[in-house]
Amino acid sequence: MSDIQVSIETFDSVGEDWERLLIEAPDLSPFATPAWQETWWQMFGGDADLKLLTVWQDGDVKGLAPFMRRGDEVSFLGESDLVDYHHFLHSGIDDSTFYDTVFGHLTGVESLKSLRLTSVPEWSAAYTAVPAAARAAGWQVEETFEDVSPGIELADDWESYVSGLSKKDRHELRRKLRRLERSAEITHVEYCTPEDIAANLDDFLRLHRMSTPDKAEFMTDYREEFFRAVVINLAKAGISRLYFLEIYGERAATSVCFVHDDSQLVYNSGYDPEQRALSVGLLNHAMTIKLAIKNGIRYFDFLRGDESYKYHLGAHDRSLYNLVVTRA
């Protein structure tokens, strides 16, 4: 019979195994990387206790639950204002064994009263495995809908992608692209290196804040500090991308994306309201999709929120849920 153990680790002690799990475990995202998690923890961990719950089998790390604890509650690292998806990581161990082990450990911590899991993707194993393991261990589970996360299953080429849009959206996209190309000299720019991204983030933040009052309110100085840090840290791992749509050399729209496996995720975006008539925000996304298809990306993920432009570009909803687990 195999020997299964649980330990609480630090970022340093579990770092190499964490990176390995990122490669081996299914259905993850950049939000599961140690670069993301540690950046968030350093800025927002505050008075919480770090609880990187690590599952070992026969001396090897098989899974990780990146938790923190405040009082009598455990939760994932990261809140929904900055983190779109939360993940457990495990490989080489079946779902039921991993989650049963996690809840076996939590049950043994008598001072722990609840587990709050936000932004759980419906397509992840955790969405069904957590309630099953929790109830089997005698806990109660409350599930609530949190948000939608629209995305696009990309075609093999640009023309096939455009042809797959609804008749109205296909017509509108082609019309807007023709109008922009006729009316201005345009350039679509991609930055990938940490140095290039760092040198151009000021323009991203300027356009982001200009876009809408809500975005200006969202991007506080503290969130800006986090945004700069996490985008650069992920760029060092080859994950970040920064895009600009330029009109006569002036930047009119922008987006920051993350690339993970064969998916590309739009973390945030912005545009110059004075160029709204040319649909520069939507067209920057369209040009980014075109480049993503060229680069072999299979899924283009707009992340949380039901903004209309996502659906005009062919996105379909996937759902995120909150799972609140309490002692019975």
Image: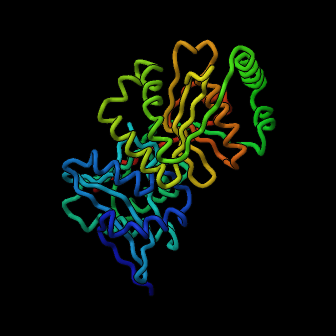
Return the x and y of residue 328 as percentages of the image width and height: 29, 56
Q: Residue at x 47, y 53 (%)?
A: 236
Q: Is residue 303 visible?
A: no
Q: Along the line of sight, which residue is nearer the eye, 31 or 288?
A: 288
Residue 98: percent from left, percent from top: 44, 68
Residue nearer the viewer, 37 or 113: 37
Across and down, in percent, residue 112 comes to: 23, 58
Q: Is residue 11 above or below residue 3?
A: above
Compared with 124, 255 (above or below) is above
Q: How many marks?
A: 0
Question: What residue is shown at x 54% (from left), y 43% (from top)?
Answer: 241
Q: Quadrant of residue 184?
A: top right
Residue appearing at x 58%, y 36% in the figure: 150
Residue drawn at (72%, 23%), measured in percent from left and top?
173
Front-most of 306 and 278?
Answer: 278
Q: Quarter of the image holding residue 49?
A: bottom left
Q: Between residue 203 and residue 173, name the one nearer to us.
A: 203
In this view, 18 is above or below 179: below
Q: Position of residue 309 (x, y in %)?
A: 60, 25
Relative side of 320 to 262, left or right? left
Q: Quadrant of the N terminus?
A: bottom left
Say how the picture is coloured: rainbow
Does the image show residue 21?
Answer: yes
